[in-house]
Amino acid sequence: MILTEQQTDRIIEMAWEDRTPFEAIFYQFELAEKDVIALMRKELKRSSFNLWRKRVNSGASQKHLYKRNNEINRFRCTRQRTISGNKISKR
């Protein structure tokens, strides 16, 4: 899959957000966790990638749905506008 610069930036932004699970990235961009990791490895500096991986694998991150609190049943913040497919709503 060929991604535009805007899509790549959005995926990186979503990957850095602790509360955005990999499933949300897959839903919007059809990229599995391993693909997101490969993209992050390619696009980030080595030190930034290492920090991100450390953060994702820590207890603070909720990047995996099985680590999330069962009461959280949404992908996005309640203050965020609706996202449909790959189209991001304008503010």
Image: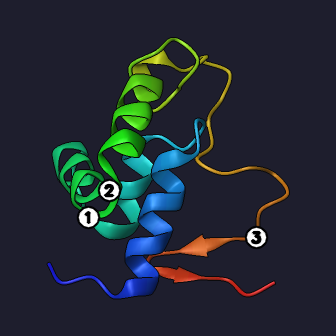
Please, what secondary structure does the residue beneath circle 3 have? loop
Which numbered circle lies on residue 56?
A: none
Which one is in front, 3 or 70?
A: 3
State how many labels appear.
Answer: 3
Q: Residue 60, image x and y in percent?
A: 58, 17
Q: Label 3 near label 1: C-beta < 8 Å?
A: no
Residue type at the position of mark 1: Glu
Seen at 74% across and 49% down, the residue is 77
**Residue under label 2:** 26
Reply above or below: 44 against 55. below
**Residue under label 1:** 30
From the viewer's perspective, is 88 left or right of 27? right
Q: Residues within 10 Å of mark 2 (few under 14, many from 20)?
A: some
Seen at 40% across and 23% down, the residue is 54
Instruction: Give whichever of discs 1 and 3 has the lower sequence position.
Output: 1
Please, what secondary structure does the residue beneath circle 1 have? loop
Seen at 51% across and 55% down, the residue is 14
Q: Residues within 10 Å of mark 3 (few under 14, many from 20)?
A: few
Q: CA distance from mark 2 to mark 1?
A: 4 Å
Residue type at the position of mark 2: Phe
**Residue under label 3:** 81
Reply above or below: 55 against 59. below
Which one is in front, 66 or 57?
A: 57
